Image (cartoon, grey):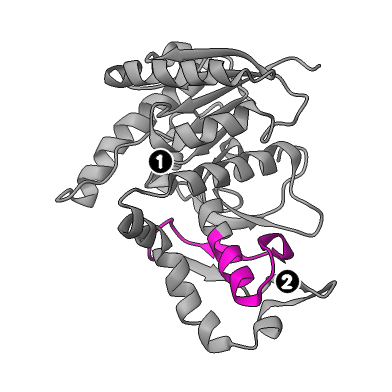
């Protein structure tokens, strides 16, 4: 077997991480032959909860998990990392101004970026999940100047998969039959799901989504609104945010980085490729050899 890779998950006592950790540990993300050293970072008041998460991971008896390290110290968490999945952030609460949300998260991601700079491998791949993800990702990247900015990306895969799923449901196919949707903009109600380049497999043949659906008004109306507001709809229905789907889409994002995108397909990721400095934005990307 290859040498273990050291993978960090922050916000590790939270709901998204709880849905994420098993998939990392069972080989779904990095492969069935890749041992993992899983590092779990939580804030100090949540360390008791994290102890329970550790016990559950031990009870899973996952053979690929060579070690699980729990900590509230950044100097321990960020040491010698191959991959950092930054889930933890300050959520926006009722009555909180956006400037206050940004200020709270700048502090977190500046500190974590500094820890990446000081302790992690320079080849580390950094995936930012905590919202506002684009801003948080840029903050972390700016705080780790010796790590290539191309190594930083943020989660748009959740919206990407939501768009694929809505098209698949409309056509009565599976999501795997839909490819090359694009998400432009922030993970918010202002995003724009774009299917102008999207394809769907029908009866063994790939056709454009507009041609397949023959329903331009839906694609230019309700489809966009559904994707933009689906997270809000989930919260309204179950009184909880989208943890299970977010965790699955983090897995998709990291696996695409690790193994590359399938031939002829692109995915949506927030990144800073070929854009002006101090800007980070979701683009359709293809990945090969982890770049």
Is residue 7 part of the magenta span, yes or no? no
The earlier-in-sequence mark between 1 and 2 is 1
For residue 231, what is the image quadrant?
bottom left
Whether residue 30 is visible here, answered yes or no, is yes
Residue 43 lies left or right of residue 55; in this view the side is left
Residue 245: x %, y % from top left: 51, 49
Residue 95 vertical placement versus 63 (above, below) = below
Q: Which residues are magenta?
A: 162-191
For residue 164, what is the image quadrant?
bottom right
Residue 180 lies left or right of residue 154; in this view the side is right
Is the residue marked by circle 1 packed among few (<14), some (14-19), or many (20+) residues within 10 Å? many
Q: Residue furthest front?
A: 59
User: In the rendered view of the protein, which quadrant contains the C terminus?
Assistant: top right
Q: Which residue is mark 1?
A: 130
Residue placed at 80% from the left, 59% from the top?
264
Residue placed at 47% from the left, 61% from the top?
185
Out of 61 and 34, give the one closest to the viewer. 61
Is the residue marked by circle 2 packed among few (<14), some (14-19), or many (20+) residues within 10 Å? many
Residue 44 vertical placement versus 185 (above, below) = above
Q: Secondary structure at mark 1?
A: loop
Is residue 168 part of the magenta span, yes or no? yes
Residue 26: x %, y % from top left: 66, 28
Out of 65 and 155, give the one closest to the viewer. 65
Q: Residue furthest right?
A: 204
Residue 204: x %, y % from top left: 85, 71
Whether residue 124 is visible here, answered yes or no, is no
Q: Secondary structure at mark 2?
A: strand
Residue 31 vertical placement versus 164 (above, below) = above
Using the numbered discs, state the Cα–Cα distance from disc 1 to disc 2 in whole angstroms.
31 Å
Residue 43 got which mark? none
Residue 200 got which mark? 2
């Amino acid at each position: 077997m290859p040498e273990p890779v050291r993978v960090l998950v922050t916000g590790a006592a939270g709901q998204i991480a709880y849905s994420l950790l098993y998939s990392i540990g069972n080989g779904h993300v990095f492969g069935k032959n890749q041992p993992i050293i899983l590092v779990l970072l939580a804030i100090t008041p949540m360390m008791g909860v994290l102890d329970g998460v550790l016990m559950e991971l031990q009870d899973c008896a996952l053979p690929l998990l060579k070690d699980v390290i729990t900590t509230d110290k950044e100097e321990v968490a960020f040491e010698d990392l191959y991959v950092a999945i930054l889930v933890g952030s300050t959520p926006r609460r009722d009555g909180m101004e956006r400037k206050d949300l940004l200020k709270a998260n700048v502090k977190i991601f500046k500190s974590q970026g500094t820890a990446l700079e000081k302790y992690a491998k320079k080849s580390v791949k950094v995936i930012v999940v905590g919202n506002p993800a684009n801003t948080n990702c840029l903050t972390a990247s700016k705080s780790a100047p010796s790590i290539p900015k191309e190594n930083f990306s943020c989660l748009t895969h959740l919206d990407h998969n939501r768009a694929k799923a809505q098209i698949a449901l409309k056509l009565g196919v599976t999501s795997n039959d839909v490819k090359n949707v694009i998400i432009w903009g922030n993970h918010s109600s202002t995003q724009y799901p774009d299917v102008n380049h999207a394809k769907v497999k029908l009866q063994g043949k790939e056709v454009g989504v507009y041609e397949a659906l023959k329903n331009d008004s839906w694609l230019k109306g309700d489809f966009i609104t559904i994707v933009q507001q689906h997270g809000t709809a989930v919260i309204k229905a179950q009184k909880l945010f989208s943890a299970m789907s977010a965790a699955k889409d983090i897995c998709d994002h990291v696996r695409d980085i690790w193994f590359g995108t399938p031939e002829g397909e692109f995915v949506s990721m927030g990144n800073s490729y070929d854009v002006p400095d101090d800007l980070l934005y979701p683009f359709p990307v293809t990945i090969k050899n982890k770049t």
